[in-house]
Amino acid sequence: MKVVADLHIHSRYSRATSKRMNIDEITRYARIKGLSLVGTGDFTHPKWFDELSTGLTLVSGASLYKSIKHPNSPVHFMITAEVATFFSSQNKAKKIHHVILTPSLETARQISERLSQYGDLKADGRPILHMNAALLVEEVMQVSTKNMVIPAHIWTPWFSLFGAFSGFDRIDDCYQDMTKNIHALETGLSSDPPMNWRLSALDRFTLISNSDSHSSWPWRIGREANAFDLGRLTYDEVSDSIRRKNTHRLQFTIETDPAYGKYHWSGHRNCRISLSPKKAAEIENHCPVCHKPLTKGVEQRVEELADRPPGFRPKGTAGYLRLLPLSEIISSIFGTSYPGTQRVWAAYNSLISRFSDEYTILLDAPLQEMSEIVDPRISEAITRVREGRVKVVPGYDGVYGQPILLEDEAYDAQIEEVSHKDIADFM
């Protein structure tokens, strides 16, 4: 059974999240995207938990849920949340985000009861907890050994396991004796499996990819995901596949090009400066405009910790595919930075009507058939994305990267070093 899963999203109760991130909208757009399984996000928030309790129904024997209003939808929900732990280690402030997976609303309620003593769960869908990372894992696992804690977007500068500003250099330093209960790592938009394969210390962990979406629009939800081949869609089969690093079940992850992520290169958004790791190191990581420290990018941070050369692949690892959201492919062809225009939606919906869902279009739809429905340039761009023939101006310091879909090879030189003045507002 083929299952595409995005296990890390947010509800409308999280800060800076669309008010349309409710059960109905998530169900609707997850199906259009081609997701079979989506995380609920934010189960620790009391109001969202109430909506989940009244809006979802348990699928018998699966420890997963479906929308009560849309029982015939193929979309299943797993009960999930993201939390932030703020603590001090070796006299330095640490701010680490974690994804929690749990098999039921009842176990979710018990987790929330335990975590409520460490922070105000009503304040945000992704609450701040004043506890260290090891204690979080201990509290969650004491509720049920079926629960999972997964370090979130592990390379982003500000709030992650290996974050340049508030993270660690070693997983064991963060989770201490609870590292034994950490089985997977979330790569985040700004890194992908090949970047993580450069650290031998990560070989024992399963790499997963999720959208961390704050919007139900298809260019956000499912932009990164996990592709499983399961005997049956259940919580246990999904979690065991991750826990056991079973590459027969978790077959590959769906990634955006890491350059598309908001923190891939080092830079300064306000100064419109972005630099490759080599260039940033040459100027000792200080902005050439304002002379303040740069926001260190993920690629540079990986380079600092890597003990293997680029291109190394350890044994027993799942595959990966690089894709871009269909809406953003179309909007790039039409020359607009916003994927939600009427013209973009018209082309998008034409393709969905013919091929059912976005992943089918991105992975399998024939070029000729697509060209009969939409502008042939869109079909060509989709094919280039599918074949890995796309250039991306790297993102930096909170600015998304910019895909260049139909340029010729002469564009390569421009990607090596750019000021980003023309894309500073590309968000």
Image (cartoon, rainbow, N blue to C red):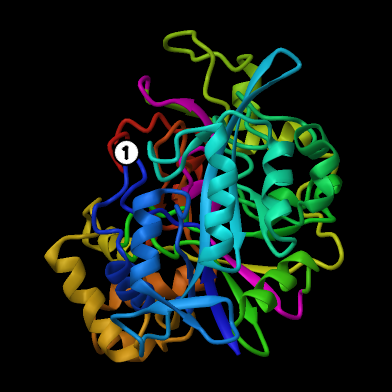
Q: Residues within 10 Å of mark 1 (few under 14, many from 20)?
A: some
Residue 267 within the segment the image draws in magenta: yes
Q: Which amino acid does the dot numbered 1 rest on? A: Ile
Q: Name the residue rendered at 41%, 45% in the picture.
A: 125
The foreground one among 14 and 63 is 63
Vertical arrangement, residue 353 with respect to residue 181, above or below: below
User: Relative to residue 163, is residue 353 drawn left or right?
Assistant: left
Asked if residue 383 is positioned above or below residue 93 in the image, the reply reads: below
Q: Quadrant of the C terminus?
A: top left
Q: Which residues are magenta?
A: 247-271
91 relative position to 55: left or right: right
Q: Of all residues shown, which one is farthest toward the top?
A: 291
* Residue at 22% from the left image edge and 56% from the top image edge: 335
From this view, report whether residue 184 is shown above or below residue 152. Answer: below
Which residue, given by chain and number where applicable, does mark 1 sit on? 423
Residue 317 appears in the figure: yes
- Residue 295 versus residue 237 in the image, above or below: above
Left or right of 235? Residue 121 is: left
* Image label count: 1
Q: Which of the two residues, 244 or 223, is positioned nearer the viewer here?
A: 244
Residue 412 x, y percent position in the rendering: 50, 47
> What residue is shown at x 67% (from left), y 33% (from top)?
301
Q: Which residue corresponds to the image point at 33% horizontal and 71% vertical from the top-left?
A: 55
Snapshot quadrant of residue 207: bottom right
Q: Position of residue 250 (x, y in %)?
A: 69, 74
Asked where in the image residue 355 lies, by quadrant, the reply is: bottom left
Is residue 76 magenta-colored? no
User: Can you say which quadrant of the picture contains the N terminus?
Assistant: bottom right
Residue 193 in percent (x, y) is at 68, 56
> Could you say whether the residue bearing mark 1 is in a helix, strand or loop?
loop
